[in-house]
Image: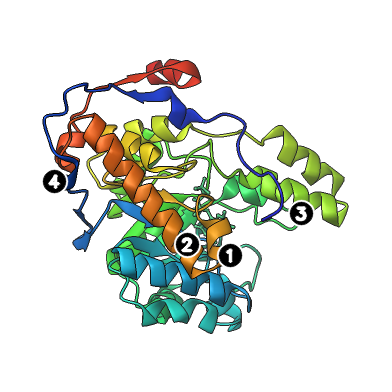
């Protein structure tokens, strides 16, 4: 997928305009973007959201990300650990993350894997969740919601009934964050999950990596015409990331804003909307595949851009940035009246 265009067609984050403050009345050197997220101290409100693991080349990518996350004091997740916990595939491609002092780490399992998809199919229950978490010494378990992706995969998992209660059962034992994978979380879904005692959300809305697009190309390669067409039809399906943030912050749990975060200015926009941190996957994938130096440079640039946005809004801290005035324009604006 590295060589293909799998981005959504509209950049919703550009619709969040922070109001420029011509007299910041602070010094750039005094800006402090550090924060506490889910009990862990981060140097900046940044999460590398789960991407990979389960095949040999993934180890290098996860290692580049983990080393850079540890050096810069930001959080990270790994990709779905289904392959490692259900089939024992390349556990080292995840476990390498545990060797770095990443301040906050997320294990990762898909909602389709916690309910039976076919009679006799293995299901990820508490024992396998424990293994997934131990593999990377995770602080939280991220359960991902990816039913759009499943609908574009020729062999996709089509059963979703019962996932909410199963998430609730796991959340009674483990600290659980629920994340989408590019189609966003609505207020209604967030409320139902809050009532099941999940600890946090990563909204992962529309406007960044489109999993309908990713699977569209895979379906094309496999000659699966109908799924390839569905992927094209639903390329931009979902709730725009900034809208999802505004809806989900209302339920009173920490929110990671993701889906199309591509710069530190996007991170600043997310914080101004009330997110506790912002996450990116597609924004660091190329760098992570290239090497550690590239990964570190990209993350440092994002943090620098965040600080520039803080300076130009007169925000010395993230608490001040959360109060910065903004205007919502473009295609995002009508969503606010839904
Ligand atoms: C190559 C790649 C693989 C991904 N794999 C997973 C995964 O296994 N589990 C998961 O929860 N999210 C996965 N995601 C989704 C991201 O964590 C994120 O929610 C989504 O890509 C939107 O963010 P972005 O626009 O910054 O890419 C993946 C994303 C990419 C780009």
Q: Alpha-carbon distance for marks 4 and 1?
A: 33 Å
Return the mark for residue 30: 4
Q: Quadrant of the N terminus?
A: bottom right
Crowding at dot 2, Cα within 10 Å, few <14 / some 14-19 / many 20+, comes out as many
For the residue labelled by badge 4, is the local secondary structure a helix, a strand or a loop?
helix
- Foreground label between 3 and 1: 1
The residue that disc 1 covers is 290
The figure's colour scheme reads rainbow
Callout in the foreground (4, 2) = 4
Mark toward the start of the polypeptide (2 vs 1)? 1
In the image, residue 137 sits, relative to residue 76, either above or below, namely: below
Q: Secondary structure at mark 3?
A: helix
Residue 257 is tagged as none
Residue at mark 1: C-beta within 8 A of ligand 1? no
For marks 3 and 2, the one nearer the N-term is 3
Q: Nearer the viewer, mark 3 or mark 4?
A: 4
Residue occupying image coordinates x 54% and y 59%: 287
- Which quadrant would residue 172 be assigned to in this image? bottom left
Q: Are marks 3 and 4 in contact (CB under 8 Å)?
A: no
Picture coordinates of residue 285 (x, y %)?
55, 57
Residue topped by disc 2 = 295
Residue linked to disc 3 = 218
Nearer the observer, 186 or 122? 186
Q: Distance from label 3 to label 1 (Cα)? A: 23 Å
Secondary structure beneath dot 1 equals helix
Residue depicted at 32% across the width and 60% down the height: 74
Taking depth in this image into account, of 5 and 107 the one nearest to the observer is 5
């Amino acid at each position: 997928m590295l060589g293909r265009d799998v981005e959504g067609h509209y950049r919703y984050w550009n619709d969040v305009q922070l109001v420029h403050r011509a007299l910041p009345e602070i010094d750039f050197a005094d800006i402090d973007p550090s924060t506490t997220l889910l009990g862990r101290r981060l140097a900046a409100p940044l999460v590398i959201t789960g991407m990979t693991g389960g095949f040999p080349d993934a180890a290098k990518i996860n290692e580049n990300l983990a080393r850079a996350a540890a050096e810069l004091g930001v959080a990270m997740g790994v990709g779905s650990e289904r392959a490692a916990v259900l089939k024992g595939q390349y556990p080292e491609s995840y476990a390498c993350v545990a060797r770095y002092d990443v301040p906050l780490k997320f294990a990762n399992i898909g909602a389709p894997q916690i309910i039976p998809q076919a009679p006799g199919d293995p299901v990820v229950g508490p024992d396998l969740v424990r293994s997934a978490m131990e593999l990377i010494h995770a602080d939280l378990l991220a359960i991902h919601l990816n039913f759009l992706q499943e609908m574009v995969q020729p062999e996709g998992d089509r059963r979703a009934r019962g996932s909410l209660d199963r998430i609730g059962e796991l959340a009674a034992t483990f600290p659980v964050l629920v994340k989408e994978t590019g189609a966003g979380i609505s207020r209604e879904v967030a409320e139902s999950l809050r009532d099941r005692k999940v600890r946090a959300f990563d909204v992962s809305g529309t406007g960044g990596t489109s999993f309908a697009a990713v699977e569209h190309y895979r379906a094309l390669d496999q000659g699966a015409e109908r799924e390839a067409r569905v992927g094209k039809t639903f390329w931009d399906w979902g709730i725009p990331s900034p809208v999802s943030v505004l809806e989900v912050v209302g339920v009173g749990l920490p929110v990671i804003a993701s889906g199309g975060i591509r710069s530190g200015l996007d991170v600043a926009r997310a914080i101004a909307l009330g997110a506790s941190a912002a996450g990116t996957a597609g924004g660091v994938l190329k760098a992570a595949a290239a090497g550690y130096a590239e990964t570190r440079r990209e993350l440092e640039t994002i943090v620098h851009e965040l600080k520039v946005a803080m300076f130009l809004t007169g925000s010395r801290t993230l608490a001040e940035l959360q109060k910065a005035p903004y205007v919502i324009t473009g295609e995002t604006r009508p969503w606010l009246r839904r």
